[in-house]
Image (tube, rainbow, N blue to C red):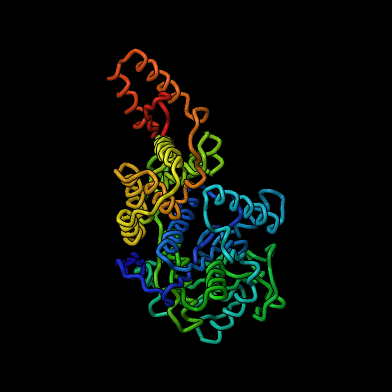
Amino acid sequence: MLRIHNTLSKQLEKFTPQEETHVSFYHCGPTVYWVQHIGNMRGMTMADLIRRSLEYLGYNVDFVRNYTDVGHLTSDEDEGEDKMEKGAKREGKTPEEIAAKYIKLFEHDIQSLNHLTLKSRFKPTATDYIPQMISMVEELLENGFAYTTPKAIYFDVQKKKDYTKLSRQKLEFNKSGAGTGDVADPDKRNPQDFAVWFFKTGVHKNALQTWKSPFNSPEVEDGEGFPGWHIECSAMSRALLGDTLDIHMGGIEHIPVHHTNEIAQSESATGKTFVNYWIHNEHLTVDGAKMAKSSGTSYSLSDITDKGFEPLVLRYFFLNSHYRSKQNFTWEALEAAKISLERLTSRVRELNNEKPGEIDQTTNQKFISAIEDDFNIPEALAVSWELLKSDLDDATKLATILKFDEVLGLKLSETTPRSPALLPKEALKLLDKRLDARKNKNWDLSDTLRDQLKEEFGIEVKDTEEGQVIG
């Protein structure tokens, strides 16, 4: 029985999808104006692990992750410059060129981290769903939940009685929508009201990405403008997954503003529950502090690979922390992950001398129990190590660990039996030293070196009539 910690109830709940074997899963994707840092990549990887876990449990998952390519201001609220325009000015390109560039880089990174996302049916960009956003704004106006000023159309939070049910903040302390940029809108009814459509006027009069609309403003012809960030996810998720979603996921920073506003506008437009299970991942820190460009700690995946680490080492590092727990990145921790991954893949290489047997159902049930406990991936990884250290035969171990890798995503099926040419230099030195020990009949040293090879490199050495062999 799968149980999920639902941010809405703040409790562990039995998971019951709307359809018995089908799950609709929406994940807030990146704003594609810059390279995504490894904190963002952790959130993306956690969503990938949850998706893989659901599929392992037998669900057919309809997974949608969007690309925000317009309307996300430099604040998550209604303040500042559009991030896409900021990126365009920075690089002397159009917003469309910036989006294409950083979507390509993002997809390269998630492919390197072995995410399933590239296999998704839908990877919507906000600019492809402007008609659906306009339609939802029209519904909000018709239902009396939104109102128009000369500068924007706002959602009236006073009309949504349970507006703060996700954040559980008192309305007066909830993060406000501020104004339309750095100049407040005097016609705005409540400080917390947020924009669902910005007109091309005021601080946005020179906006680079705008569309005509049926909305009226005395300052703008043809209602020209662009959508607010929050309405984008509501419209895209509704168009692709329906009025009610089984799961919606994002970072904890989205709770008080973005996700709170998504709920308000979606439920006010449809009259239905927007999401049944809200999942939020915690942040990644670096050396115990928040990542920041100013301190040089806003690392990207290319920074990791430039240091000589394979992308899957970062994925393995992420496996060691629960999605709802903060995780601290250090280069020492990444080095430890590298060593552990090398030991894991070395052991699987040795098992690959065998043909896979049958999956061990007892161990598999332990693995399932771990992922059914709110997607406890660190525990699932521990079960994987228990398997490899067990007394089960190699063929059973191989079949079972390859099955587990459907969740772990470490490409273990691509490992091949190890040849001496592929061994680390340090391991080769120990093997040569062990040969000398056996020639000199120093059996104690031979045994010690055998144990050292297994402990440090995951290499099992067997003595045969032809001499010592690996595996």
Q: Is residue 330 visible?
A: no
- Looking at the image, which residue sits at the far top? 440
Give how far across and how far down residue 247 sits, in percent.
43, 69
In front of the other: 314 or 457: 457
The mark tally for this picture is 0
Res 196 → quadrant: bottom right
Residue at coordinates 68% horizontally, 58% vertically from top-left? Answer: 95
- At horizontal 31% and vertical 15% (from top left) the residue drawn is 441
- Residue 212 location, quadrant: bottom right
Kindly identify the residue that appears in the image at 49 percent across and 76 percent down: 265
Residue depicted at x 42% and y 54%: 403
Residue 271's place in the image compared with 364, above or below, is: below
In percent of width and height, residue 46 lies at 44, 55
Residue 223 position (above or below residue 347): below
The N terminus lies in which quarter of the figure?
A: bottom left
Q: Nearer the viewer, residue 299 or 199?
A: 299
Quarter the C terminus occupies: top left
Query: In the visual, does 442 lie left or right of 400?
Result: left
Q: Residue furthest front?
A: 465
- The percent coordinates of residue 409 (x first, y second) are 47, 51
Along the line of sight, which residue is nearer the eye, 133 or 342? 342
Furthest residue toward left: 444
| Residue 393, horizontal then vertical, whole percent | 34, 44
Residue 369 in sight: yes
- The image shows residue 264, relative to residue 307, as above or below, that is below
